[in-house]
Image: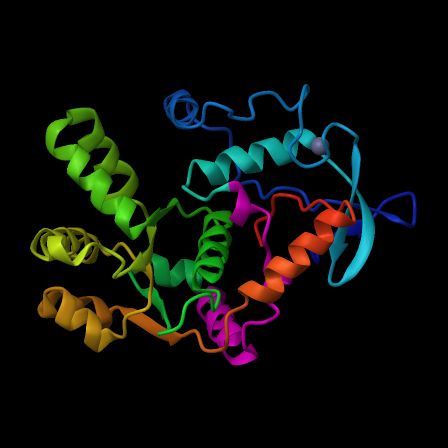
Amino acid sequence: MSDSTASGSPETLLLPRNPLTVTPLSNEDYEWLKELHSALWRDPNVSCLTCNKKGTFRTRVQGEEVMMRCDCVEQWGLHLWLLNAGIGLGYQRLGWDHIATIPDSVQESVLMYLEHGRAYAEVGHGLTLWSPSRGTGKTLLATLILRNLMATGVDGFFCLFNKLLTLHTAGWRDDKARKWFERRIMNAEVLVIDDAGKENPNRSEMVSAVVDEILRTRIDNARPTILTSNLSQEEMGERYLSDVVELFSGCNQSIEVTGTSYRPRFEAEMRENARRGLKFPVVIG
Ligand SMILES: [Zn+2]
């Protein structure tokens, strides 16, 4: 958003162009998305989730209300590309502008990782974002890190921890599901696992085995994982198999996402934005 540049009219901004790495989906991935999303946005010439085909929309950039010109085709392409990486529309519309409540020291640590993110990703060095409190912005940060890495050409996937367990289980019975899991989860160049530790405690043995398999496979193949959790490293060691947690911690930088919940202020801002008719485009960050 901060890269926006003025167009002919001094009051109308242009959306930043999509990075060249945002390419059309393969037929297989597009069909998969259509199966998952019955109301998938299929034609940017007919509808637009950003401007509603008005061509422009009012939004907020760095605290200022501005008019922005929409590029419906670019927005559609970016939306599908991110959806295919497991990032839903809610997070697609949130960028660095929306993390003001996250302490500067945390933001700086994340930006320092991203400065060499591509090189870290190539050697399998990931990140763990953790905090004992909820709502401090771990998931939003994780999607921003993933989007920024993907913009450099890295293949990525975002998955809720509990969904990961469901998808893994689906692969036991279905060959297609297993192959999909291998390709998109096990072998994603960067995998975000969101909210580890949220599982049903009655399934702990099965969960430990799945966590062990996924993390070990990824470590063996130098594939980095970005993990968010309410658990500290010590608690993770008690919950899962301690040797894999130790191995994982060795190739993951841990950042404690301190601060208070951003949710109450964020929700109030979103309601106010909706009342004012403001729209937020799909962004990389
Ligand atoms: Zn549009």
Q: Assess whether residue 105 is covered by the magenta stretch.
A: yes
Q: Which of the two residues, 2 or 206, is positioned nearer the viewer here?
A: 206
Chain part drawn in magenta? 89-116
Q: Which percent across, then down, holds residue 142?
A: 43, 59
In the picture, which quadrant includes the C terminus? Answer: bottom right
Work out whether residue 225 can be spotted.
Answer: no
Q: Which of the two residues, 100 or 119, is positioned nearer the viewer here?
A: 100
Residue 104 vertical position relative to residue 199 in the rendered view, above or below: below
Work out whether residue 24 can be spotted.
Answer: yes
Measuring 46% from the left and 46% from the top, which residue is drawn there?
Answer: 153
Q: Which residue sits furthest right?
A: 9
Residue 188 sits in which quadrant? top left
Residue 78 vertical position relative to residue 117 in the rendered view, above or below: above
Q: Which percent across, then down, holds residue 79?
A: 55, 36
Magenta highlight: main SS = helix
Measuring 41% from the left and 67% from the top, which residue is drawn there?
Answer: 134
Left or right of 242 in this view: 101: right
Left or right of 50 in this view: 81: left
Residue 104 sits in which quadrant? bottom right
Left or right of 2 in this view: 175: left
Measuring 19% from the left and 41% from the top, which residue is drawn there?
Answer: 168
Q: Which percent across, then down, holds residue 56?
A: 80, 37
* Quadrant location, ligand no. 1: top right
Q: Which percent across, then down, holds residue 141?
A: 48, 62
Q: Which residue sits furthest bottom?
A: 105
Q: Assess whether residue 251 is covered by the magenta stretch.
A: no
